Structure formats: structure tokens, C-alpha cells
Image (cartoon, rainbow, N blue to C red):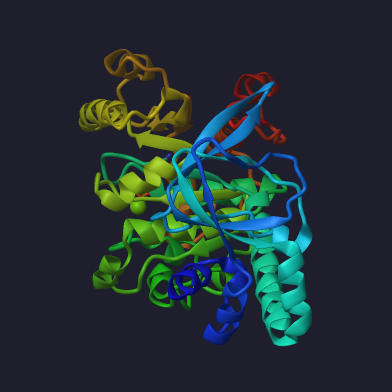
């Protein structure tokens, strides 16, 4: 009896029931010894029994065309050594076939006995209904979150000062202004990131508080963001450099997952070191923008960086190589750099100190005004190319090539 109660405790359907309730349920359990090869139930059949595995192993089969394909096995010492629990409530069709792989001892509760128990004991019925409503609610919330999966674009460069932060900020602003998408800009330069400051925003909370407060849902997540007038949100880097230690890669993955349920695009600005957090950001990204300036130091570092990307087994379609400050004074010609790197640039942005430094000095993105410039046009091409969105001023022939990068 004690054994049965211990198993019942692990079953989500009986969450919230007290020991005395579980004892009553255990009284309607029947024990059966089954030889190897017994089919307990078949996929598609209407379910009327629930089983707990006391000894042995069963195989789980799913229909695959005309035949059944084994998908997994369940053994009596597995964490979830039970199957078919929902049959007790809704008599739903079985979603798999279960066959004993060894001799098995199973405990069986049938729907008739279980219904009787519920009728006689309204307390148990009430508790089970409460547990079920909770479960249903969390499942439908999960479904809502899964419905939207934002694309992650991480901006990286093996060298500092290559223009990552200016690029990431303008990218977020451009997507927000010129497309219908919801955009989040994440400052992952955790020690010395100044994205919020550059954008003239006063963040009240940062990623450090978000981690500290153990944020787990979309509604709470939004409270840690600061809005930009261009229509995108910013998750700021910590106020103090020492707080950067608070954020680890598990936090990052969890937080970005929440962000993906709210935003269409998540743009991540990084710093120039291959450390755990950055590699995790690169891992989970749909696209990695590798930025470089046209000089020897950057060429050498980018050469190594592309090798690391290969070692990390990132497919080449995940990477966009971007030349920043094209045609700046003393710049190496674009074609020579491409030859040296054995890779073509996907996009380039011209050298434009005035417009690039608008962000640094005046807290303005290129998209704050509509003043035309080569730099702005370069950006529109780049945004259009990265997102596959048609933006006024972008080249339609380019759009054809990029359709499909994101599978849209
Ligand atoms: N296309 C560009 N033309 C001219 N200056 C640029 C350009 N892009 C960036 N800069 C300048 O380069 C400097 C470094 O940019 P920043 O985005 O802070 O680099 P990172 O984040 O990679 O360290 C800034 O002063 C910025 O104004
Ligand atoms: Mg930076």
C-alpha cells in the first residue's frame, strides 16, 4: 500500500491530494501480472484504464505509416513509471501503443472504479479538478509562448571598436521603424556596456536585477525593459561591472527564451571576447553579424574568428560578414579583404563619422531623422537583407536572394 501511495504522489493528476486521499485511491487499484509481449492498449483506442508499473519494462510504440515504430521504453524505476492517466478523466483516445517488453507487474485503476470513488468523495474530486485546471492553464500559457518564436541576431566582432554597438542600436531602430516587428535590443556587454546611455535612455532595472529576481514569465520580463521612442525595447547591461558575474549562460538562455515569446527580433550586442556567455549567445542565434573594419588588425582577427566559427560548427548561412567603415582613410580595398578571408562580405556600411557618431555624441540613431545619407541607405540594405523585409529604398533583387534565410 505504501508503495502504491509513493507512486501516486509522482503523478501530476494527483498533485495537491493529501495522503488520506491517496490512500483511498490506492484502495481501488488492482494488481495484475502480465507475461512478456502483452499489449496493454493500442494507439487510437478509447482509454478506460490507468496503469502504474510496479515491476518490469514496457515498450511504447507510435504509428509510422502502416507499421508501429518503437519510440521509447518505460521501466518500473523510471521517474514517470505510469501511463494513461488522462483516461481516468476524459476517456481520451490513447496516443501510443504499450506492450510489455519483460514480465511485468502493473497496478491498474479503471475508470468505473475511479468515478465511483470521485462520486463518494467530493473532496478528492474537487482537489483533482483544481489540479487539472492549473495544469490546463499552464499548458495553454506554454502554447501561447511557443506560438511566437522571435529571431535572434547577435552582433559580434573579434576586435573592440569595430562599431558593434552603433550597428546593433541602428539595426534595432531600423527594424522597429521600417517594419511591423517588435524588437528587443539586449546589451550583453555586461561589464562596460553603455547601450542605454548611448540611446539616451534611463534604465531603472537591468539584466542583473532580472536574474536576481528570478524572472520567469513574459509579463514580469517586460517590467525590466526600457522603451525607446522609435518603438523598440532595451534590456540594459548591469549598472556596476561586478554585477556582470551574476549572469550565467543558463540565465541567458532562459531569458532569451522568454524574450522570444514576446518579440519578433532580439538583437544582441556583445563584447569582443569568446567567453562562455558570448558563445552561448552565438549558439542560440539565428544569425550572427560579424563586423570588421578594413584594416590589417581586423583582417587578421577576423580570419581567426571565422576559423573559430567553423570549430563551433556554425553553418556558414548563419553568419553574415559585414564590412564597417568602407572607404575610410587608409582602408584596405574590399576586394583584397575578401581574397584574404576567402569569403565575400554580405553587407557593407560606408565610413561616416558624422552619422555614426550621432549615437555616441548626441544619443541619436540614424533613423531618428529622415535625412538621406549613404550610411543610412547602407543600413536599409543591410536590415532588409537580414530580415527579408521589404523596406522603402531597399533593392528588391536583393530581397529575392535572402527570402528563405529565415524560412519565410
Ligand atoms: N561606419 C562608421 N563610420 C565612422 N565611424 C564609425 C562607424 N561605425 C562606428 N563608428 C565609430 O566607431 C567607434 C566605435 O563604435 P562602437 O559601436 O562603440 O564599437 P564597439 O561596440 O565594436 O566597440 C564609435 O566612435 C563610432 O562612432
Ligand atoms: Mg560596444
- Residue, x 38% and y 55% (percent of image)? 77
Residue at 40% over, 58% down: 252
Image coordinates of residue 18 in percent, x first then y, are 55, 85
Q: Residue at x 69, y 78 (%)?
A: 130
**233 or 122: nearer the viewer:** 122
Give the number of callouts.
0
**Residue 69 as seen in the image, left or right of residue 190:** right
Front residue of 204/286: it is 286
- Residue 371 in which image quadrant: top right
Q: Position of residue 30 (x, y in %)?
A: 59, 63
Q: Position of residue 164 (x, y in %)?
A: 39, 45
In this orientation, does residue 16 appear? no
As rendered, which of 396 and 46 lies closer to the eye? 46
Let me know if residue 97 appears in the view: yes
Left or right of 227, for residue 358: left
- Identify which residue, 62 or 152, lies in the foreground: 62
Q: Quadrant of the C terminus?
A: top right
Q: Position of residue 218 (x, y in %)?
A: 59, 66
User: Would you identify the image quadrant in which residue 102 lies?
Assistant: top left
| Residue found 31% across the figure and 19% down from its top | 337
Amino acid at each position: 500500500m505504501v508503495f502504491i501511495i509513493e507512486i501516486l504522489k509522482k503523478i501530476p493528476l494527483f498533485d495537491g491530494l493529501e495522503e488520506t486521499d491517496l490512500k483511498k485511491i490506492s484502495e481501488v487499484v488492482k494488481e495484475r501480472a502480465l507475461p512478456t509481449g502483452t499489449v496493454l492498449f493500442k494507439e487510437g483506442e478509447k482509454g478506460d484504464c490507468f496503469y502504474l508499473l510496479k515491476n518490469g519494462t514496457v515498450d511504447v510504440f507510435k504509428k509510422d505509416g502502416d507499421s508501429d515504430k518503437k519510440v521509447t521504453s518505460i521501466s518500473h524505476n523510471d521517474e514517470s513509471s505510469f501511463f494513461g492517466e488522462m483516461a481516468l478523466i476524459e476517456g481520451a483516445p490513447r496516443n501510443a501503443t504499450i506492450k510489455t517488453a519483460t514480465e511485468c507487474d502493473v497496478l491498474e485503476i479503471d475508470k468505473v472504479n475511479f468515478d465511483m470513488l470521485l462520486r463518494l468523495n467530493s473532496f478528492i474530486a474537487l482537489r483533482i479538478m483544481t489540479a487539472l485546471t492549473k495544469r490546463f492553464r499552464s499548458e495553454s500559457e506554454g502554447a501561447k509562448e511557443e506560438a511566437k518564436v522571435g529571431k535572434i541576431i547577435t552582433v559580434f566582432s573579434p576586435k573592440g571598436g569595430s562599431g558593434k554597438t552603433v550597428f546593433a542600436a541602428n539595426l534595432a531602430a531600423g527594424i522597429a521603424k521600417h517594419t511591423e516587428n517588435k524588437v528587443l535590443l539586449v546589451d550583453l556587454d555586461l561589464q562596460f556596456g553603455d547601450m542605454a546611455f548611448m540611446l539616451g535612455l534611463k534604465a531603472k532595472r537591468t539584466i542583473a536585477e532580472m536574474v536576481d529576481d528570478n524572472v520567469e514569465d513574459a509579463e514580469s520580463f517586460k517590467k525590466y525593459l526600457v522603451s525607446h521612442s522609435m518603438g523598440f525595447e532595451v534590456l540594459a547591461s548591469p549598472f556596476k561591472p561586478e554585477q556582470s558575474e551574476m549572469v550565467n549562460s543558463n540565465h541567458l538562455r532562459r531569458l532569451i527564451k522568454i524574450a522570444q515569446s514576446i518579440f519578433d527580433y532580439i538583437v544582441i550586442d556583445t563584447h569582443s571576447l569568446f567567453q562562455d556567455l558570448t558563445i552561448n549567445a552565438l549558439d542560440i542565434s539565428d544569425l550572427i553579424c560579424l563586423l570588421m573594419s578594413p584594416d590589417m588588425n581586423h583582417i587578421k582577427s577576423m580570419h581567426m574568428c571565422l576559423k573559430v566559427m567553423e570549430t563551433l560548427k556554425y553553418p556558414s548561412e548563419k553568419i553574415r560578414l559585414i564590412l564597417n567603415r568602407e572607404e575610410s582613410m587608409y582602408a584596405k580595398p574590399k576586394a583584397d579583404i575578401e581574397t584574404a578571408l576567402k569569403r565575400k562580405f554580405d553587407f557593407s556600411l560606408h565610413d561616416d563619422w558624422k552619422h555614426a557618431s550621432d549615437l555616441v555624441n548626441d544619443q541619436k540613431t540614424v533613423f531618428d531623422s529622415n535625412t538621406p545619407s549613404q550610411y543610412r541607405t547602407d543600413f536599409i540594405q543591410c536590415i532588409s537583407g537580414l530580415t527579408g523585409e521589404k523596406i522603402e529604398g531597399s533593392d528588391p533583387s536583393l530581397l529575392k536572394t535572402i527570402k528563405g534565410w529565415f524560412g519565410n
